[in-house]
Image (cartoon, rainbow, N blue to C red):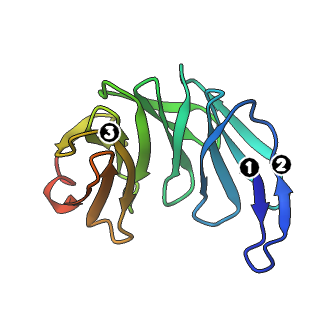
Amino acid sequence: MKVLDAMTWQEVYTLTGHSDRVSGVVFSPDSTRLASACYDRTAKVWDLTTGRELLTLKGHAWFVESVAFTPDGRRLATGSDDTTAKVWDLVTGKELRTLKGHTDWVTSVAFSADGKWLASASNDHTVKVWNTKTGREILTLQGHANSVNSLAISSDGTRLASCGDDGTVKVWSTRTFVDRK
């Protein structure tokens, strides 16, 4: 992976350490770290000041497709082709939760603006919403006719967008589900 300076477009770092295809990257909220998802079944967290690898997160049984930081940068979510999403503590590097419920690959993960819930998209045509404290599924959003590829949550946390192989983008109001247990 290469990290470029946005002003000069010059290479700052080449981050090496994964042994297979890197499938996703995300900056930490304070832009000091980068997380990467890889087909080597790991996610890595990198220090962007030094270019050093800080953590390797191992625990998925298959490819890791996506990564997402909590707004406070203390936790990371990973989505995998093993049909699970995981939540990791970035201070200890320990797995906090395994979120099970999808029946096909988890293609995208995204935390709410307050970090209290996580959305996961899957090739099973659904988006699931999880309580990050308990690990319980809050609800399943259905409406895509094919795989769901990516998620985005508005900065104010009131909307969740999903897009899929069915050629649609769906925008969901989070007000209807954030208070569910």
Q: Nearer the viewer, residue 136 or 51?
A: 51
Rendered location of residue 160, percent (x, y)? 29, 59
Foreground disc of the pair 1, 3: 3
Q: Residue at x 16, y 46 (%)?
A: 143
Q: Which mark is residue 147?
A: 3
Rendered location of residue 126, percent (x, y)? 25, 39
Mark 3 packing: few (<14 Cα in 10 Å), some, or many (20+)?
many
Q: Which residue is mark 1?
A: 46
Q: Residue at x 31, y 24 (%)?
A: 103
Ranked by sequence position, the earlier of labels 2 and 3 is 2
Q: Residue at x 43, y 39 (%)?
A: 107
The correct choice, above or below, for 97 with respect to 152 in the image is above
Q: Which mark is residue 165?
A: none
Residue 172 left/right relative to 71: left
Mark 2 packing: few (<14 Cα in 10 Å), some, or many (20+)?
some
Ranked by sequence position, the earlier of labels 1 and 3 is 1
Q: Secondary structure at mark 2?
A: loop
Disc 3 residue type (three-letter):
Ser
Residue 160 left/right relative to 58: left
Q: Quadrant of residue 58?
A: top right
Residue, far left: 176
CA distance for labels 2 and 3: 35 Å
Q: Which residue is mark 2?
A: 52
Q: Nearer the viewer, residue 171 or 78?
A: 171
Disc 1 residue type (three-letter):
Trp
Q: Residue at x 38, y 53 (%)?
A: 151
Q: Nearer the viewer, residue 55 or 134?
A: 55
Q: State yes or no: discs 2 and 3 in contact (Cβ < 8 Å).
A: no
Mark 1 packing: few (<14 Cα in 10 Å), some, or many (20+)?
many
Ranked by sequence position, the earlier of labels 1 and 2 is 1
Q: State yes or no: discs 1 and 2 in contact (Cβ < 8 Å).
A: yes
